[in-house]
Image (spheres, rainbow, N blue to C red):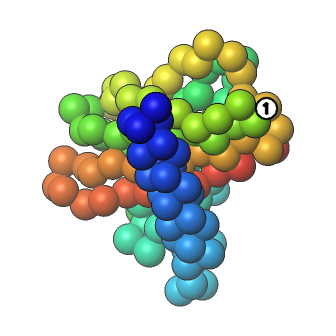
Amino acid sequence: MKKRSIVSILAVITLSFGSIFAQAQNKDGHDGHGAAHGGQFVEDANHHGVEMVAKDNEIIFHMTVEGKPFDVTGAKFKAIIQTGTGTKMVALKSEGATLKVTLKTPLAKGDKLVVTGKDSHGDAIQARFVKD
């Protein structure tokens, strides 16, 4: 029970920072390079782009830097997922310029996700999404 409370508190803090992060994005007037795969796209101040494509139980995050595919093979990323039934953390499998996870159930409209991790250069990358 204690571990679950700590995970919930960490998730709330991370989602809060994710909200601040999302609001701070593109302050330099740079609109990003767009969602090449038809998903939701966010880009940070260092031009790391993350596009979320959620289909059925699978979520794929396409990673870019300066609008070009960004190889994250071997990098450690996780997703914090907040649904109507609770909050959970899942490890993401890195493969080329994508991060992937297969969930037990599909995301519902309004579910929140924060992707967080470090690339091979040690740069922190974080992106926040709300399933539409």
Q: Position of residue 51 (x, y in %)?
A: 57, 46
Q: Is residue 16 above or below residue 8?
A: below
Taking the view exactly as shown, the residue that stands out farthest to the bottom is: 28
Q: How busy is the neighbourhood of tag 1: few (under 14 within 10 Å), some, or many (20 plus)?
A: few
Query: Residue at image x 66%, y 46%?
Result: 112
Query: Residue at image x 46%, y 32%?
Result: 1
Between 55 and 78, the one nearer to me in the picture: 78
Taking the view exactly as shown, the residue that stands out farthest to the front is: 1
Horizontal relation, residue 131 to residue 3: left or right = right
Taking the view exactly as shown, the residue that stands out farthest to the left is: 121
Q: Position of residue 101 (x, y in %)?
A: 49, 23
Q: Is residue 46 above or below residue 85?
A: below
Q: Is residue 123 above or below residue 20?
A: above
Q: Position of residue 114 (x, y in %)?
A: 53, 49
Query: Residue at image x 27%, y 38%?
Result: 76
| Residue 36 seen anywhere in this rendered image of the structure | no
Residue ID for mark 1: 108
Local SS, label 1: loop
Horizontal relation, residue 17 to residue 19: left or right = left
Between 114 and 16, the one nearer to me in the picture: 16
Query: Residue at image x 64%, y 35%?
Result: 86
Between 113 and 29, the one nearer to me in the picture: 113
Total number of numbered discs in the rendering: 1
Q: Amino acid at mark 1?
A: Ala
| Residue 73 seen anywhere in this rendered image of the structure | yes
